[in-house]
Image (cartoon, helix red, strand yellow):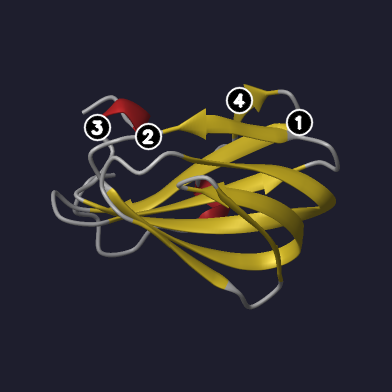
Amino acid sequence: MKNDRYVYYKDVKPQDMGGGVTRRVLAYSDDLMVVENTFEKGAVGSLHHHPHTQITYVVSGVFEFEIDGVKSIVKKGDTLLKMNDVVHGCVCQEAGVLLDIFNPYRQDFVND
């Protein structure tokens, strides 16, 4: 799937991440990756950090995010910037979908 010009949603099987979260790795190259995460109400994205810059777009739902110790409620249409190695995580307040964009791509998410 790496470097595929077209990635059809129907062909990408969701990965059960446990705790009410599913992940779909969509289009990606060495420099950029798009990942869809679906959260059930109450699901938690545990506090973590990684060496990738990440932008999250809230497609739907309501989430309480924590980025670098600061908490905020975000909703549909909001975006979040998480710089390299900044600690971040979330709790889903209302079931929804997050679209994550990473630079560079997350090798730990794929079997290349």
Mark 3 residue crowding within 10 angstroms, few (<14) / some (14–19) / many (20+): few
Three-letter residue code for mark 1: Gly
Quickly name the residue at label 1. Answer: 20
The reply to whether discs 1 and 2 touch (Cβ–Cβ < 8 Å) is no
Rendered view: 86 above or below 45: below
Mark 4 residue crowding within 10 angstroms, few (<14) / some (14–19) / many (20+): few
Mark 3–mark 4 distance (CA, rounded to whole Å): 16 Å
Quickly name the residue at label 2. Answer: 49
Three-letter residue code for mark 2: His
Mark 2–mark 3 distance (CA, rounded to whole Å): 15 Å
Mark 1 or 2, nearer chain start: 1
Residue at image x 76%, y 31%?
20
Kindly indicate the quadrant of the structure image that contains residue 90.
top right
Mark 4 or 2, nearer chain start: 4
Image quarter where the C terminus lies is: top left
* Percent x, y of residue 93: 83, 50
Dot 4: element? strand
* Percent x, y of residue 37: 59, 46
The reply to whether discs 2 and 3 touch (Cβ–Cβ < 8 Å) is no
Mark 3–mark 1 distance (CA, rounded to whole Å): 23 Å
Three-letter residue code for mark 3: Gln
Three-letter residue code for mark 4: Met
Quickly name the residue at label 4. Answer: 17
Image quarter where the N terminus lies is: top left
Dot 1: element? loop
Position of 8 compared to 93: left or right? left
| Pair 4/2: label in front | 2
Residue at image x 52%, y 71%?
79
Rendered view: 80 above or below 22: below
Dot 2: element? loop
